[in-house]
């Protein structure tokens, strides 16, 4: 009789658990599994989506990628060194990709062994159809000084504002040599959203190399998420650098080395990436080590524990200086603290440039927060100092700033100028739902706890 009762209770518990899971799945179906349909499309026979990326892991290479027509044909890049007058032709590799609603051919050409501190003009062509001419400048001869821009998630349409905001950011930072994106550059993997993305990058990524990582919005949803081949065909450096199906990449630029991970994958894939990262970090002799990853290792939403367990120990063990992250649609910055409370590396930042803002937690281990706005970062490397500055996109006002100083064999020192810049934490709940009221309460509690920050 006792065994029967125990079995009955166990069976009842399992049934309740399955019912709860069924209800939760029904409520979260669109979030977990729904992919917006891709509208049928046809690709014209003139080159489109022309852009520069980095190449084989060295600063003296660029890849040029583009889309044209439905079938791959003979394609090339005409390259001119404007200072020397040298002209060359680089043949491109083409591959067609069938998406859910259309077909397109994607091309990539490898521009290797470029001259330093030189201006190049280039155009791409497929058969007799050519693009307009574009220009780019290669890295300067002094490799302990350079700068770049970083944006987190762009993701949603903001009616052309992305293009204007990025152009203004580069205008205000003319020395920035390239753009880094922390994933979710595109809202969803459809042709229409990719078109929107390249509209946002128009007259930018043809002139400045773009280094982008995978975000969860780049994947087709499902029980097992799927990254379309279209992604590495567009960001063609992954074609050479990926390990299995893992979109990983590393690049040495001046006295810095960048490490790119795909944090969207399942446990087995993350474990493979961990082995790759450990190998690359252990071999690195760069003065500055910068990791770019979509999911924050220290979350402001209480998530990403697997990613943190996989990668954060390596980040700290091998002296990564800066971790650039996205995904959580707010701004947050966290420095590592020594036992005596002094700030040191790694420095972790979370940022986004999307119209959507998420409800976050205010963890006391973070040094600074930002909500209800959008941001971009500038990173300047100058010999022994890496300077990080965060700007709000509207007005391009300075929101956060710090220096990492590494002199000789001394431990890294943090000069935190952002603590003197007030945080903007104004929030208007969009409705009276309890989650918005609770978020407003969290904000008020944080303000009372840290009046010096606001």
Image: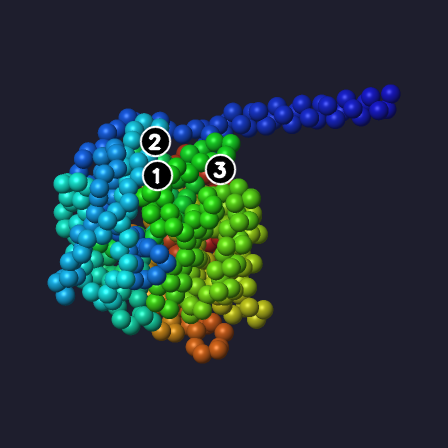
Q: Residue at x 71, y 23 (%)?
A: 12
Residue 75 percent coordinates (x, y):
21, 44
Q: Answer whether labels 2 and 1 touch (C-beta < 8 Å).
A: yes
- Mark 1 vs mark 3, CA separation in Å: 37 Å
Q: Residues within 10 Å of mark 1 (few under 14, many from 20)?
A: many
Q: What residue is shown with label 2?
A: 99
Judging from the image, what secondary structure is the residue with disc 2 in?
loop
Q: Residue at x 27, y 71 (%)?
A: 141
Instruction: Tell me if 198 is positioned left or right of 361 in this view.
Output: left
* Residue 435: image tag: 3
- Mark 2 vs mark 1, CA separation in Å: 8 Å
- Mark 3 vs mark 2, CA separation in Å: 38 Å
Residue 127 falls in image quadrant: top left
* Residue 200: image tag: none
* Residue 230: image tag: 1
Q: Residue at x 74, y 26 (%)?
A: 10
**Sequence-first tag of 2 and 1:** 2
Judging from the image, what secondary structure is the residue with disc 3 in?
helix
Residue 414 against residue 89 in the figure, above or below: below
**Sequence-first tag of 1 and 3:** 1
Residue 112 against residue 413 in the figure, above or below: above
């Amino acid at each position: 009789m006792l065994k029967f009762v125990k079995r009955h209770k166990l069976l009842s518990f399992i049934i309740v658990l399955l019912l709860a899971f069924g209800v939760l799945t029904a409520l979260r179906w669109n979030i977990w599994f729904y992919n917006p349909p891709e509208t049928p499309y046809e690709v014209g026979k003139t080159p489109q989506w022309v852009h520069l990326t980095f190449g084989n892991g060295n600063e003296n290479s660029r890849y040029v990628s583009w889309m044209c027509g439905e079938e791959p044909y003979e394609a090339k890049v005409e390259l001119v060194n404007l200072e020397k007058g040298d002209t060359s032709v680089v043949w491109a590799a083409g591959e067609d990709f069938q998406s859910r609603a259309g077909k397109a051919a994607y091309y990539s050409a490898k521009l290797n062994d470029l001259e330093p501190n030189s201006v190049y003009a280039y155009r791409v062509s497929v058969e007799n159809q050519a693009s307009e001419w574009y220009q780019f400048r290669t890295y300067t001869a002094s490799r302990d000084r350079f700068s770049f821009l970083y944006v987190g998630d762009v993701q949603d349409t903001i009616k052309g504002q992305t293009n204007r905001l990025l152009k203004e950011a580069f205008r205000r930072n003319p020395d920035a040599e390239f753009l880094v994106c922390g994933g979710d550059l595109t809202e969803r993997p459809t042709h229409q959203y990719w078109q929107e993305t390249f509209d946002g990058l128009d007259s930018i990524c043809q002139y400045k190399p773009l280094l982008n990582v995978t975000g969860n919005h780049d994947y087709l949803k499902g029980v097992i998420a799927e990254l379309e081949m279209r992604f590495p065909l567009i960001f063609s450096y992954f074609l050479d650098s990926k390990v299995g199906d893992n979109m990983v990449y590393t690049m040495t630029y001046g006295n810095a080395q960048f490490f790119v991970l795909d944090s969207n994958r399942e446990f087995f894939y993350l474990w493979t990436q961990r082995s790759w990262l450990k190998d690359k970090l252990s071999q690195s002799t760069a003065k500055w080590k910068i990791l770019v990853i979509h999911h924050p290792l220290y979350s402001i939403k209480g998530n990403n524990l697997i990613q943190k367990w996989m990668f954060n120990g390596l980040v700290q063990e091998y002296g990564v200086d800066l971790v650039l992250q996205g995904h959580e649609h707010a701004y947050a910055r966290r420095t590592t603290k020594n036992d005596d409370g002094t700030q040191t590396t790694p420095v972790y930042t979370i940022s986004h440039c999307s119209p959507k803002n998420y409800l976050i937690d205010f963890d006391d281990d973070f040094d600074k927060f930002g909500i209800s706005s959008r941001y971009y970062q500038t990173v300047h490397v100058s010999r022994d100092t890496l300077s990080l500055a965060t700007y709000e996109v509207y007005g391009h006002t300075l929101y956060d700033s710090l220096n990492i100083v590494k002199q000789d064999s001394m431990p890294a020192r943090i000069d935190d100028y952002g603590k003197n810049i007030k945080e903007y934490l104004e929030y208007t709940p969009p409705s009276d739902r309890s989650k918005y009221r609770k978020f407003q309460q969290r904000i008020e509690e944080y303000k009372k706890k840290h009046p010096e920050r606001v």
